[in-house]
Image (cartoon, helix red, strand yellow):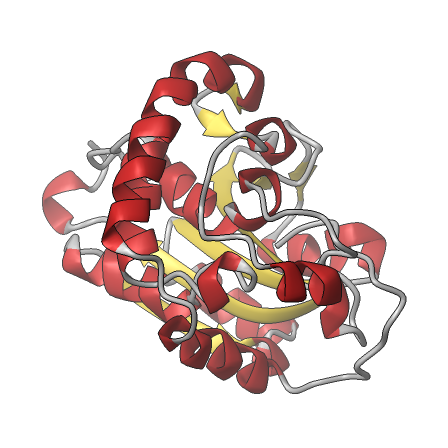
Amino acid sequence: MKGIRTGRKTGRLPPRLVLWAMALATVLFRVPERVRRAHFAENTRLWDTLAPAAVENGFIERQEMLAPLRYGVSRKGLSRRLLAGRPLTGGENTCEVIAVYNALGALNMPQPGLPELLRRFEGRGISLGGYFGTSLYALRRFFRKQGCHTAALYGSRADRAGTERLAGAGTVFILTMLNTADNLYDMVHTVCVTKTDGGVTVHNVGEPGRIYPDLYSAVTGYNGGRGRPVWLMALRAPESREGG
């Protein structure tokens, strides 16, 4: 989730607790199959129109342009509590699925359209009906099913030494950050990070093309240094696709 402000504060919470909450909330407010089918049809119709404004050099960089997409079901009570009364939109709650889309492209793996990925995770992985985005464990399960090698660490271990070790375990990374270090009400944002000449690039943070010198700098530099890491996962494509 991205860009949510309610005025409330939770205080600093352990990253592991945030991960577990997102995972446990997948059993709440599940999206009915008929709704998923309707969302898929509508998202498919809209995608070709929305993609040119959201995609740059093969990566989705501007999630805010995808507000018309549907992922999850709006509920007045949750919208009032978590979104200051705004309805749930794809411009706010699809960042985990966007990170999957971007990572598949960077790994040179088959890349379904975003509507297809939204359909898959809306069936299994969506958290609190979309209000908590998508469970990060569901993302890991997805990549393992594709044959990818994965390694991960909790945000509490994402210091320079831990991050540098993980950087050697993958070619592409999924990073989840609290938007504000001490306030879960400001929600989390999940992004794809790719290696590039001279460092790494973080996608879908509103600064396409910016290069950080290393993975740790990307983690600590998120949101002007105001965020805090929750989860960092390294991905490596199946050997048959390495260097492909």
Please state the horizontal and vertical placement of residue 138, each as a whole percent of the image: 33, 65
Q: Is residue 17 left or right of residue 4?
A: left
Q: Is residue 236 visible?
A: no
Q: Position of residue 83 (x, y in %)?
A: 72, 56
Q: Residue at x 45, y 54 (%)?
A: 173
Is residue 173 visible in the rendered structure shown here?
A: yes
Image x and y of residue 63, in percent = 59, 35
Above or below residue 130? Residue 16 is below
Along the line of sight, the residue nearer the viewer: 136 or 210: 136
> Closest to the observer: 108 or 230?
230
Query: Which residue is pictured at 9% across the width and 43% down the height?
Result: 240
Q: Nearer the viewer, residue 237 or 25?
A: 25
Q: Is residue 134 above or below residue 99?
A: below
Q: Quadrant of residue 25?
A: bottom left
**Quadrant location of the N terminus?**
bottom right
- At 46% from the left edge and 39% from the top edge, which residue is drawn? 70
**Closer to the camera, 107 or 91?**
91
Q: Quadrant of residue 241?
A: top left
Please say if 12 is above or below 107: below
Give the x, y percent position of residue 91: 60, 38
Name the residue located 82 percent from the left edge and 57 percent from the top edge.
5
